[in-house]
Image (cartoon, grey):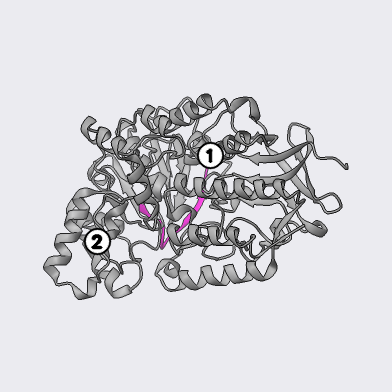
Amino acid sequence: MSRVDIDAVVVGAGFAGMYTLHRLLQDNFKVRSFEAGDDVGGTWYWNRYPGARCDVQSMEYSYTFDDDLQQAWEWTERYAPQPEILSYANHVADRYELRPHITFGTRVVSAHYNEESSFWILSTDGGETLTSQFLIMATGCLSSMNTPDFKGIDSFKGETYHTGQWPQEGVDFTGKRVGVIGTGSSGIQSIPIIAEEADHLTVFQRTANFSVPAHNQLLDEEFIEDIKATYPEFRANNRQMMAGFGSRNERHEDSVLDADETLIQERLEANWQRGGLGFLGAFGDIVIKKEANASVAEFVRNKIREQVVDPKVAELLCPDQVIGCKRLCVDTNYYKTFNRDDVSLVDVKEHPIDEITEKGVVTNGKEYQFDAIVFATGYDAMTGSLLKVDIRGRKGQTLQDKWAAGPRTYLGLSTYGFPNMFTISGPGSPSVLTNMIVSIEQHVNWIRDCLMYMRSNQHQAIEAELDAEDYWVVLANDIAGQTLFKSCNSWYLGANVPGKPRVFMPFIGGLPTYAEICDDVAQDNYRGFTVE
């Protein structure tokens, strides 16, 4: 092969893939997108489990690039549920006529770089082969399921489901004995809903997680009108927030250690009553100093004890790690669900699950029999979907081998040895520590500008330099090391996937700092990149 079929291939048609497609089409790039699902939506296409909703408020979890779109779309709840987010994704696809450029139900199975001609050769599971100058991976951070390799997992005779790949038609658990394995975010969201349907629900918990109330509600028309009237200012202020959202939440930078007990309790109580991820904004050092973190963690444990009637169950639900080192969960009636007579909690930390039989789950010598088992066991986050594709760069090196000891990128956008390949919200970027749509737009805009630069200067290839990549990896890890994020086993570190290298994957320096660095790199003739 010696010719390029198209300018860019975009892998994935979630919010990242759709915006990439839209931006590049606007600039007359010849671009195609491939999507494994039957429609757009990405993470929100696959994650249809009961109770699934975003933990960023709906008026903030949306595209900012088109004010007409912002004004036209109507959100109905404070935290948008999955069906509404999926409807929004479909609306965007229709509004900007994206579907003709997307090949659905198709996976890119391999992408090999041709050094001689500086383009990518891609193959799909539909048998198509094509060449593209640029490869843009918009595969999502939470779209690759993690299913533990339990002994006998295929022997169960009942129904099995994974929260990350829920049936489109939904599931009716009425009158059934249901087991849920896992108490991360998807478990915490789905357990209260499943409990309302099931004849009996048994929850298997290995690690208790901190969760704060969502206080979800229908949006007030006056609130909606106020946000829409000030969207430009509101969005600009959000982009200056560490996580890209929450500019209207009261945030304090003083230390817990300098506050008296009355102030600590007042602030934490106010944030608890407000609900949501802004809870950790009560003080500036909650995720930095263990001593500061301890009183905040105990405050939440006491809230759990207040809600759960059985003291033994309450203590099992109280996490023993620092608060914030794992992603804080946001729930509706999660802890109170364990007060129900038809809900049981089984601790599998000291006595892990031995096996799954044709009738149910065995732990500590006891078999629990079920009609259905739900695996709420999370995702192979950030790298899982990327590494499912056979990606090979210079000299045939696979991305799997390059990242054998953990992902290595420059700016979270590019990796040495893989020219003309970009990752959106990948490892080494703020990604999952931020409002994903805001981070997606920042990444896509940077990539679009880079491609325009390449085209206007008739450059063939751009590649991260090894020294720049080394610098970025060290910097990202040094910043993470100054916090408590690396103090517990979380999916930020890949600790939920057996055999996955333990590396803190997101860039924790905050979205404003990160965006400024990216802009500075571009303005300095793409410092840290080699351009051919």
Rate crowding at label 1 as few (under 14), some (14 to 19) or many (20 or more) other CA atoms within 10 Å.
some
Q: Which residue lies furthest to the left in this view?
A: 262
Q: In this view, does 13 lie above or below 454?
A: above
Q: In which quarter of the image is residue 121?
A: top right
- Disc 2, disc 1: CB below 8 Å? no
Question: How many numbered badges does the structure rendering display?
Answer: 2
Q: Which amino acid does label 2 sit on?
A: Ala
**What residue do we see at 53% from left, 39% from top?**
156
Picture quarter containing residue 175?
A: top left
Label for residue 282? 2
Q: Which of 56 and 294 is in front in this view?
A: 56
Q: For the view shown, which residue lies furthest in the front direction?
A: 456
Assess whether residue 320 is covered by the magenta stretch: no
Q: Where is residue 171 in the image (x, y as percent from the top left)?
A: 43, 28
Q: Does the magenta stretch include residue 354?
A: yes
Q: Residue at x 29, y 36 (%)?
A: 229
Q: What element carries label 2?
A: helix
What's the residue at 66%, 59% (across, down)?
415
Q: Where is residue 483 in the image (x, y as percent from the top left)?
A: 40, 70
Answer with mark 2 or mark 1, whichever residue precedes in sequence: 1
* Segment colored magenta: 345-357
Question: Percent x, y for residue 303?
Answer: 20, 56
Question: In this figure, which residue is indicated by the disc labeled 1?
Answer: 156
- Indicate left or right for 210 with 500 as reference: left
Category of crowding for the residue at label 2, using alpha-carbon neighbours closer than 10 angstroms: few (below 14), some (14–19), many (at least 20): many
Relative to the observer, which residue lies in front, 354 or 440?
440
Quick check: 514 left or right of 114?
left
